[in-house]
Each structure stands twice: as structure tokens, then as C-alpha cells.
Amino acid sequence: MQRPIKCLRTDNGTEFKNKIVEKYLESVGISHQYSVARTPQQNGVVERRNRTLVEAARTMLSQSDLPLFLWAEAVSTACHTQNRSMIHRRFQKTPYELINNRTPTIKYFHIFGCKCFVLNDRESLNKFSAKADECIFIGYSSISAAYRVYIKKSKTVVESVNVTFDEEMASDQISSELVITGVLASGQISSEPV
């Protein structure tokens, strides 16, 4: 059973407190309430979700040693992957499943910050020029089935489907760090020689 929304409660952020949102809410008959400034406990679900995304993005940037100016890409990638992988307790489905009524595929997921190569089809090349540019994988396109990569040489972000990933080095580094930091710290593997 679906019920119409009567009231929307948000914080005092400018993303919610503006004329466009107010005009829309008024046109559909939804009243708008604001929480008191600097009281995240009044809108706990949204703040927890934001905190989860920020913590995931912080971890992704730290693990990959990428510069902080790519923080928005990390948050977007964290949101993309969490919407397709985290199960909602109440419905036992991912948010993607709830909206699209089908199980998401995650075969195309790659390690954030891994080295990759993108086909250079943006500029004319001579016969012996490199056909690919070395890049860093930073996420997924929001408007098409493409990857977002950061080209080191030109310091630009491009979207492309012509990407070859070199995740072997990244996965080796991650798995060795998990053994050193996580598994040994939790006592799951004995540190004594065999």
C-alpha cells in the first residue's frame, strides 16, 4: 500500500532550503519542515547515510593515495556501489532492487584508484604514438554505461567504455594489507611460524 507524502523534514542545508524545492513541494501539496541547525540527531537516517558515504569515500581515497580534490568522485562511487550491494534490512533487497525490481549486476565493479588505460580517441595520433593513456579509475558514469577515469598526463577526467584495468597490482597490495592489518589484528591467523 502506497501513501502520499504529507510532510518532508530536512536540515537547513541550501540543497533543501531554496525556492525551487519550496515551489515544487507547494505544487504537490507537501509541507516542508526544517530541523534545528547543528542537530543531526533530528534527522538521523539522512545523517547516518551521509556519514556512511563520507567514511567510505575517505577510506577509498586513503587506500588509493589519491588527492583530496577527487573527493566528489569517491563519494559518487561509494554511493553507486552501496546502492547495488548493501541489503536493506526491512526489505532484504538492495536500494537498486527496490527501485528497478531486478537484481543488480556487479560484474563491472573495479577497485577504486586502480591503474587503468583508456583508448586515446580524443586527439589525432601519428603512426607511432601511444594508443592509450595511463589513468586512474575513479568511478562510474551517472548517465551512461561507462567508466570515469582520471588521466594523469592531461589532469582531466573522462568517461569511456574503452578502458583496460590493471587491478592485479592493486588487489595484491590490498590482500597483503588485509593480512597484515585486519586478519592478524583480529587473531584469525596465527602469527607464529608454521
Image (tube, rainbow, N blue to C red):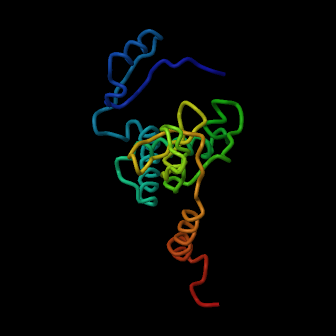
Seen in the picture, residue 89 relative to 26 is either above or below; the reply is below
Task: Name the residue furthest bottom.
Answer: 193
In the image: residue 38, left or right of residue 141: left
Residue 63, percent across and down? 45, 60
Q: Kindly give the residue lying farthest to the right in the view shown.
A: 102
| Residue positioned 38% across, 36% down in the render | 42
* Number of marks in picture: 0
| Image quarter of residue 4 | top right
Quadrant the C terminus occupies? bottom right
- Can you say whether 177 is above or below 129 in the image? below
Task: Check the image and name the residue furthest to the top.
Answer: 27
> Which quarter of the rendering shows the N terminus?
top right
Query: Which residue is at the front of the view, 136 or 21?
Result: 136
Residue shown at the point (52%, 56%) measured from the top left = 114
Q: Residue at x 71, y 38 (%)?
A: 103
x then y, percent, for residue 46: 44, 37
Residue that lies at the very extreme toward the front in this rendered image: 127
- Left or right of 34, for residue 49: right
Left or right side of 19 for 6: right
Give coordinates of residue 13: x percent, y percent: 32, 31
Residue plotted at (60% across, 76% down): 188
Q: Which of 11 and 164 lies nearest the eye of the viewer?
A: 164
Depth order, front residue of 114/12: 114
x and y, in percent, of residue 119 in the image: 56, 45
